[in-house]
Amino acid sequence: MKKKNASFLAKLLQLCVDLKAQKAGKLLQAYILRTCHFSNIYLINRLIELYSRCGDTAAAHNLFNLMPVRNLFSYQPILDSYCKANDLWSAHDIFSHMAERNTLCWNLMIGALSRNGYKGMALEWFYRMRMGGLVPTRFTLAIVLSACGSLGDVVCGRECHGVAIKLALDGNVYVGNALLGMYMKCESVSEAAVVFRGLRECNEVSFTVMMEGLVEANLVNEAFGMFILMHRNGLTDSVSISSVLSVCSKFVVENDYVGRNLHNLHGKQIHGLALKLGFERDLHVNNSLLDMYAKHSNMESAEMLFNTMFEVNVVSWNVMIAGYGQQYNMGTVLEYIELMQMRGFKPDEVTNVNMVAACVKSGDIDTGRRIFDCISSPSLTCWNAMLSGYSQNEYHHDAVVLFKEMQFRNMRPDRTTFAIILISCAEMGLLEGGKQIHAILLKTEHYADPYVANGLICIYSKCGKLDVAKRIFGEVPQSDIVCWNSMLAGLSLHSLETEAFIFFKQMLGKGMPPTEFSYAIIIKCCSSLTSLSQGKQVQGLILKNGYGSDVYIGTSLIDLYCRCGEVDGAKLFFDMMPCKNTVTWNEMIHGYAHNGHGYEAVTLFENMVQAGIRPDSVTFVSVLTACSHSGLVDTGVKIFNIMHQEYRIKPLKDHYTCIIDSLGRAGRFSEIEVLIGNMDCKDDPILWEVLLGSCRVHSNVKLARRAAEELFRLNPNNSAPYALLVNMYSSLDRWDDVKYVGAIMNKQQITKEPGYSLV
């Protein structure tokens, strides 16, 4: 009778386990205790399993402790309970007391370790399991392969792949998907493709993992092709639609104009497919569509979709706010914030970050800071957004002050924080601040991060501590191209061009492919050395690596040819450039001016205007210099007049210096006097020195005295204006004036610096 009763109780308990009926289970536990069934291990195991399934770990553990005798199935549910609660300490304690362990127990421990970030330890436990003679299941392999992917340990992943093949589990879709994920995370696309082709059965996860991996590998067309194949197999779901939309969103900024339009077209096609498949009410799909349109700056389509959505959430509002912020449309951003709150949606951390970022991008730093200050507990992302805003808008002092405040509020910086603040310190030349941050970094795990190391290299190289910068560069375990470029820039900044060339050769020797910035720096070094032969070698490398059409590199090459006197070569390269910006035109005009080709400089300036390129302040300095050096006085005056009449560019001291030099060479001093009366920059010594030199040539004593008096006022100890006056008076045989100037020099104790030969 008792045996029959125990069987009936077991069935009731199994039903409670299946239904997670904890209250009913407690009633049965009371009955078991009253009827002396507590010695029945099977019944107590079912009770422990019930409490574990219901998440009542304490009740399960209390019952476990009361058991007089335990077996494997007594330990298993309590272990499962602790693993699900992520209580690794208690789980390990239970596991260590088990007399015997099966594959399920090992799976629970390995899974818990991996889930809690102990990926390396999870792999160690997998090896211990194998050494114990236990055969892994598909669940074991899936957990371990996921850990290998997260660690980027492709060697261990391949070993697990071999185990899967040996156990004939490589064709299992569950293990196959884990293999795909592992190879894609380890950037081994070709091996992932082999696994994909070998799968006997593919599901939505298989295609989605492949698609996302191809996106990460920048194989955009292949990712779209994978989506098409998935659709043809009838496996298109909301997750895959969202994944392929992320492809369109991700590459909008990184690709050229044609690429952007192509991805925009793909996005619209996928939008049509989503409607056709009946996903118009799917919130996740709609939010992905919003994000795609916003990142393409197509806010008209985004707003149309947003207004017709059946359901919106905070994510939807955040996407719209970020989209308008990207377009610097602060008015609409503020309207959306107000509407969001009116409709009962509370702004979250992402909203705050988007608001701060929108202000930063539009240059409204003050509003961004007010929003930031209104956030009671800003997240690290929010701090970084504000710091980035200060740094990008060159408010470096404010960035340093905010970083200090961050320390006082016990907000721990990350790699992004350190990189931003180091750049600000570098721009300010704040070496002591950089050293303090360096000291903090030595105690953190971020010291070896290339992103942070780049900031340290920048500050030490800009502050002239190149030995320290080199040491930091050598300590980075895997220095990226940004670190190499920072070292190159530091050497170039301190006129160590030869050393920069050696460094550039080392960079090529180690297989580090140069970027546009690398080439621009090294061409600048060639220009400083006026070494056209080396420049042509670098140019050959540029053309070989496909950077010949880059506008910045092209501009640097024009400067190189012009500095080396090869103006015709520079013009030939200029004409061949497919894309030119204002700086390119300015460089070519300046090259003509520098080499005495005034007519060509003026003609090129006129071509620039006819091509619809708006000249800037630097353009006018270059063309006015050309007019001055070539005696094109009237042309120079005409260009000077249209600068502020047509282009509304206020003349600066450099413009005045050029036009005064031009007029002075021609002896047109009455026009110079009119200019001097109208100009604001009367405290520029170079301007008065130029005028004094012209007066000496043309013997204009009256204006020369005025120029000299202005120079005496600006720098009384400078002997140059005294010497120019003496030379002018002596050439006119005005010896009394020569004595008067000499007396003033003696009184002021000013001595003329003796000349010396540069040979």
Image (cartoon, rainbow, N blue to C red):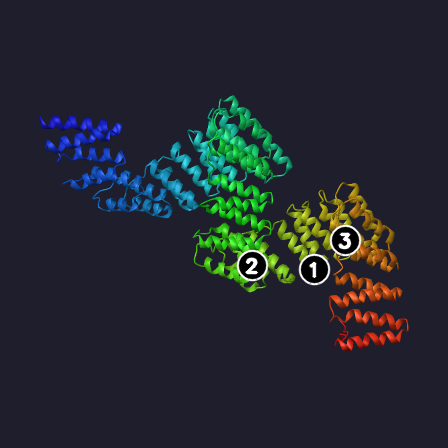
- The quadrant in which residue 80 appears is top left
Q: Label 3 amino acid?
A: Val
The image shows residue 7 at horizontal and vertical percentages of 15, 27
Category of crowding for the residue at label 1, using alpha-carbon neighbours closer than 10 angstroms: few (below 14), some (14–19), many (at least 20): some
Q: Is residue 296 above or below residue 702?
A: above
Q: Label 2 amino acid?
A: Ile
In the rendered view of the protein, which quadrant contains the N terminus?
top left
Q: CA distance from mark 2 to mark 3?
A: 32 Å
Q: Which mark is residue 389?
A: none
Mark 1: secondary structure: helix
Q: Residue visible at 54% across and 39% down?
A: 218
Q: Is residue 102 above or below residue 384?
A: above
Q: CA distance from mark 3 to mark 1?
A: 21 Å
Can the viewer see residue 540 in this picture? yes
Q: Is residue 738 left or right of residue 383?
A: right
Q: Residue furthest right?
A: 733
Q: Label 1 amino acid?
A: Ser
Q: Which mark is residue 621?
A: 3
Mark 2: secondary structure: helix
Q: Is residue 200 left or right of residue 329?
A: left
The image shows residue 429 at horizontal and vertical percentages of 58, 60
Category of crowding for the residue at label 2, using alpha-carbon neighbours closer than 10 angstroms: few (below 14), some (14–19), many (at least 20): many
Q: Which mark is residue 528?
A: 1
- Residue located beneath label 2 in the image: 459
Nearest the eye: 332 or 439: 332
Nearest the eye: 186 or 588: 588
Earlier-in-chain disc, 1 versus 2? 2
